[in-house]
Amino acid sequence: MTQPYIVGVGAANLDLSGASIAPIRLRDSNPGHIRLSAGGVTRNVLDNLSRLGADVKLLSAIGCDAFGEQILRESRAAGIDVDAVWRTDQAVSSMYLSILDSAGDMLVAMSDMTIIQSSLPGGYLTQHRALIRGARIVTCDPCIRERALEELLDLCGPEQTVCVDPVSTAYARIVAPYIGRFHTAKPNRMELEILAGLPVETDLDLARAGERLLQQGLHRLFVSLGSEGCFYMDDCGRILRKKLRPAAQMVNASGAGDAFTAAMLYATLKELPPERTLDLALAAGLAALSYPGTINPSMSLPLLDRILKENSI
């Protein structure tokens, strides 16, 4: 029997991150550690999913440059099927630049997604219709822009779990008109405000905004609340709020959201209940926070269960 697989449609970047070893002085040179690695929201989600044991396939765009070669090399090494990734010599591969403060939290970041926004040919996703329609789960980010996002939604069937991470408030505005066509969304509080068109300041606001999205057709909502955990709501009437004990030391915050999404989708693939799904997702976020790079190479179910045992409240 063929193993069910997950298709990811979205960003595949080269990440350049600098972590300061002392409080940052703006407009000055700061000593720190600099890393270069494959990244991108959707690629990172698939990377974590593969380490958890899922069969994953990437649809994205890269350039015929050294950065593109590194993205492909690291993705293959992680177990991601990259055979359908579009390659072009008309643009450089996507890049993401981030600066972390001495506490491991992001101070500022900048992304150049020109290749996937401008060089992805029309009909690319339709060309891979069979691959997309054969997936049990499809996950995406709106870096592919509105035209491709709409094309993807048209290709997916009602029996598939289609998940979106809005990524930022700017991209959430692209997602908002289509939110009812997704099965699952994972915004943070600010992105939820954009998606729902409502202020989200209190727990009551969370529920009110979530209800608006469910009324539009969304089936599940996971709202990332940082150190306060996650708010969950679904169209079966379940509402959950869970958090774990914060990490003793945050090393790098940049990959926590992608790890959360990966574990959530893995639990979805395995048809685990919402409580277990939230536990695994929160544990995966902590696993990412504790590692200097964006991807924790030790990501696994035993690691997540150990984190849950040590950090459950």
Image (tube, rainbow, N blue to C red):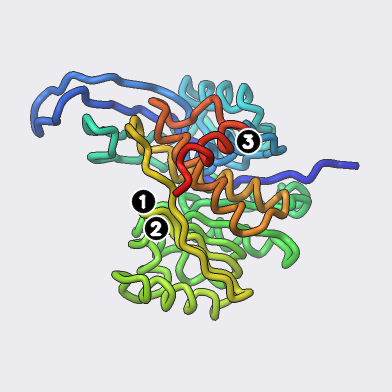
Measuring from the top left, give residue 309's x and y in whole percent: 53, 39
Q: What residue is shown with label 3? A: 301
Q: Around disc 1, counting alpha carbons within 10 Å, would you say few (fewer than 14), some (14 to 19), or many (20 or more)? A: some
Asked if the residues shown at circle 2 and circle 1 are in contact, with their CB atoms under 8 angstroms apart, the answer is yes
Q: Which mark is residue 175?
A: none
Residue at 55%, 34% (x, y): give it: 306
Badge 1 element: helix
Residue 167 coordinates in the image, percent (x, y): 42, 52
Q: CA distance from mark 1 to mark 3?
A: 22 Å
In the picture provided, is 62 more to the left or to the right than 105? right
Label 2: few (<14), some (14–19) or many (≥20) C-alpha neighbours in 10 Å: many
Of badges 2 and 1, nearer the viewer stands: 1
x 72%, y 60%: residue: 160
| Residue in view at x 37 percent, y 37 percent | 247
Q: Which residue is mark 1?
A: 226
User: Mark 1 belongs to which amino acid?
Assistant: Gly
Is residue 296 shown to the viewer in this render? Answer: yes
Residue at image mark 2:
188
Distance of mark 3 from mark 2, alpha carbons?
25 Å
* Residue 27 location (% of width, % of height): 8, 32
| Image vertical order of residue 169 relative to residue 4, above or below | below
Q: Judge whether residue 166 can be spotted in this image.
A: no
Left or right position of 176 against 100: right
SS assignment at label 3: helix
First in sequence, mark 2 or 1: give its number: 2
Task: Compare marks 1 and 3 and give the one earlier in the sequence.
Answer: 1
Identify the residue at the far right of this view.
Answer: 1
